Image: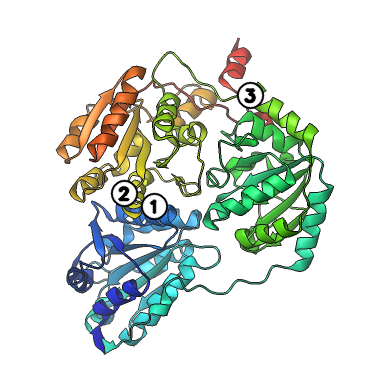
Amino acid sequence: MQLTGSEIVIKCLEEQHVDTVFGYPGGAILNIYDALYKNADKIRHILTSHEQGAAHAADGYARATGKVGVCFATSGPGAANLVTGIATAYMDSIPIVAITANVTTDLLGKDSFQEIDIAGITMPITKHNFIVKDVTKLAETLRRAFCIARSGRPGPVLVDITKDVTANKTEYEFDAGQAERRFPEKPVDEEEIRTALSMLEESKRPCVLAGGGAVISNAHKELAEFVEKLDAPVCDTLMGKGAFNGEKPNYTGMLGMHGTKSSNLAVTKCDLLVVVGARFSDRVTGNTKRFAKDAKILQIDIDPAEIDKNVKTTASVIGEIKTVLGILNERLSGQSHPEWMETVKELKEKYPLSYQQDVLTGPYVIEKIYEITKGDAIITTEVGQNQMWAAQFYKYQNPRTFLTSGGLGTMGYGLGASIGAKVGMPEKLVFNIAGDGCFRMNMNEIATAARSDVPIIQVVLNNHVLGMVRQWQNLFYGKRYSATVLEDAVDFVKLAEAMGARGCRITKKEEVEPAVREAIASGRPTVIECMIGCDDMVFPMVSPGGAIEEAFSQEDLEKKNQ
């Protein structure tokens, strides 16, 4: 049948079982929005307040559901406003397809009104991108974009379509077989498996590090079986939260700069570190020359480019995490390391996470949310202290329940992501944990939640400063608070109400539980502003350039300064 390019875009989304698109219209993309209007019963459109919010919402939708997230933007500034969201998804390997429209083909390269080379701009931050100037190639390009986004190591793909292509007609045939199409996996190398099994069976003090790849691969069941067979402690990266149940006794917590002392010391003392879908970020390893210095390192990853990139490994297995762990589980005999497990247990008992108990703090708020939700919620975060506290003090039992910007560290990510997550998983409670500095970045998306009736709960830990930056200024910059104090007249409660949401402010510990329960019961988007101290810090902490075993606590710092 003959369809316009715009109608083909909508049909291709239907092929891919896309049920929601996040976006913002404009002149160049009007034809696509017109086609979307005619198909509103099949595809829901969430009009965000800013294109960056649309990209983050598509990202949050993808992380929470495991599907490909989709966002729309018009040419020029509309497309450019997606860049931060695309880069965020790229750094964390999140499958989104960003569809933008450009000026007509005859106006390309002429500095036309609202023209920008978005394909050129996003080339370093996408798995692949396309510019479509021929309507006959549109359907196959879109199909390929979705396949690329979800295949192998996932990531964002951009498809830029000139406006004339959206209006031109061509023959189109619906292809229901496109849904979930992926490029085939390469078979796992048998020699790599044999080497891995030998290392696992020889180890006396193994430790497992779970990363974001274990979440992306939906390998949590295989990982749990693997850990049980290996009889090993488990730590995780920020992106790996929920890959292994955080309530299990052999879970030691997050690794790295703000990881637990028990995790940092376990990795330092182990003789084999099994790294499952993690890329050895600098915030995880600290000083790489001293990272796991007494251990052999076995890295399991889908991307061969990650092997030996940041840390030299002893051996590696390349392949889909779920597939590799399945093979290892079939062939690994049950191991037993009672002395090592007792050592790790003693580390956990000796170095628990702690915080000031007599006043309202970020950790208290997080723990109370965990208690009320029984761990059965999706937590999104911004970046900084709020992010670290959410990682430390909420126990993630399942994958895809902790959504955060790990690689790029994008302030303003969490609110858009929470909207996407709630739309994708409407039966789940969704909380976005933010500092006041991060919340300011994209707080206009509260209006999106209110307009589209998306009942997310926005928690603002308001310390009137850029908390993590101030923490560094406290510790390493002689308390010179350059441009980090946010003492002003912004009233977040009134702001929430002005945008159509509920708002409340709490200043005492005993006010937290009623406020959270009321927000849940209301079924409306709600902003809970929590007033905390400006000099509260995240501990433990590893100094920049330090080794992870040198993590220090508040008590360590006080003793040093005496």
Mark 2, secondary structure of its residue:
helix
The quadrant of the picture occupied by the C terminus is top right
Residue type for callout 2? Ile
As measured in the structure, the alpha-carbon distance from the residue carrying label 1 to the one carrying label 2 is 7 Å
Tell me the residue at 59%/52% (across/down): 221
Up-down relation of residue 278 to residue 44 (above or below): above
Visible residue check, residue 261: yes
Q: Could you classify mark 1 by the number of other residues whose Cα lies within 10 Å: few (under 14), some (14-19), or many (20 or more)? A: many
| Residue that carries the numbered disc 2 in the rendered image | 419
Query: Which residue position is annotated with label 1?
Result: 60
- Sequence-first disc among 2 and 3: 3
Applied colour scheme: rainbow
Query: What number is the disc on residue 351?
Result: 3
Classify the position of the N terminus by image quarter: bottom left
Residue 535's x, y, as percent?
43, 21
Q: Amino acid at mark 1?
A: Gly
